[in-house]
Each structure stands twice: as structure tokens, then as C-alpha cells.
Image (cartoon, grey):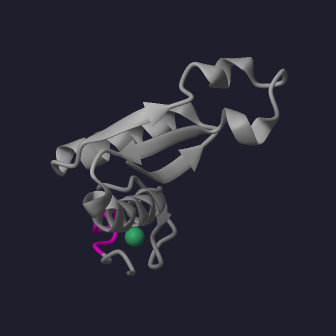
């Protein structure tokens, strides 16, 4: 087993594990229960960790998680460069003026 991800955010850790499982990589969470004890235990030990069951999956897992994080970062509302309209992330084109979303 190898640790591929650590976070204080339970949702982020769950998301990471789900992402890996979707890709067929066996993964599990560690410290999920400890995290509720934050404040009593040194914080570094309360990080929720994602481990891959098979060491051979670790490199691919880390790659997937990095890619997933990058994707999540781009999934934010954006502002049209043409008319200034604010648009939801799922749109690639401004409904107001037709301008395409800048990369
Ligand atoms: Zn526009």
C-alpha cells in the first residue's frame, strides 16, 4: 500500500478515493475517524489519507489526482471577455453575446 493523497478536508479525501475507484484503482481512506479529533491530536496526524492498495498503481493514482484537481480548479464560474456576463462553468460560450470561453 502507498499513500497518494492527504487532506484535512474529508470531502476532498472522499472525492480523491472515488476518483481512483472510478478508474479501477483500489484505494482506501485512513484516519477518517481520527479527523474528528482535530485539536486533541497534532494536526499532521489528523490528515485524512488516501492509500492505494497496489503500489504499482501509485504513479497513475497521483497523476489522476493532479489532473482531477486541475479540472476542479477550472470548473469555476467565468466572466465573458466580450460583454462581462457571468457564466456557469458548464457553458463554453456566452449566451449573451456568443463569445467563446477563453482557454
Ligand atoms: Zn458575452
Question: What is the tally of numbered marks visible in this picture?
Answer: 0
Chief secondary structure of the magenta span? loop
Task: Examine the rendered structure and indicate whether residue 97 appears above or below residue 91.
Answer: below
Is 71 inside the magenta-drawn segment? no
x, y percentage for residue 10? 54, 31
Task: Examine the rendered structure and indicate whether residue 45 appears above or below residue 83.
Answer: above
Q: Residue at x 42, y 65 (%)?
A: 66
**Quarter for ligand 1?**
bottom left
x, y percentage for residue 26? 24, 43
Task: Examine the rendered structure and indicate whether residue 12 appears above or below residue 68.
Answer: above
Which of the pair 1/76 is nearer the observer?
A: 1
Residue 91 visible to an observer of this rendering? no
Determine whether, in the image, residue 90 is placed left or right of residue 38.
Answer: left
Q: Residue at x 28, y 67 (%)?
A: 92
Q: Residue at x 64, y 22 (%)?
A: 34
Residue 82 visible to an observer of this rendering? yes
x, y percentage for residue 7? 59, 44
x, y percentage for residue 54? 27, 51
Which of the pair 21/68 is nearer the observer?
A: 21
Which of the pair 81/31 is nearer the observer?
A: 31
Q: Which residues are magenta?
A: 92-98
Determine whether, in the image, residue 63 is placed left or right of residue 21.
Answer: right
Question: Furthest residue to the left?
Answer: 24
Which of the pair 3/94 is nearer the observer?
A: 3
The image quadrant of residue 18 is top left
Split into 4 quadrants, where in the image is the C terminus? bottom left
Q: Residue at x 32, y 77 (%)?
A: 99
Amino acid at each position: 500500500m502507498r499513500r497518494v493523497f492527504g487532506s484535512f478536508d474529508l470531502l476532498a479525501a472522499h472525492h480523491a478515493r472515488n476518483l481512483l475507484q472510478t478508474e479501477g484503482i483500489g484505494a482506501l481512506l485512513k484516519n477518517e475517524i481520527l479527523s474528528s479529533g482535530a485539536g486533541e491530536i497534532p494536526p499532521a496526524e489528523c490528515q485524512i489519507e488516501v492509500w492505494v492498495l497496489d503500489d504499482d498503481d501509485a504513479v497513475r493514482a497521483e497523476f489522476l489526482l493532479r489532473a482531477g484537481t486541475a479540472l476542479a480548479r477550472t470548473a469555476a464560474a467565468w466572466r465573458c471577455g466580450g460583454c462581462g456576463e457571468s457564466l456557469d462553468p458548464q457553458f463554453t460560450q456566452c449566451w449573451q453575446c456568443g463569445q467563446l470561453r477563453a482557454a
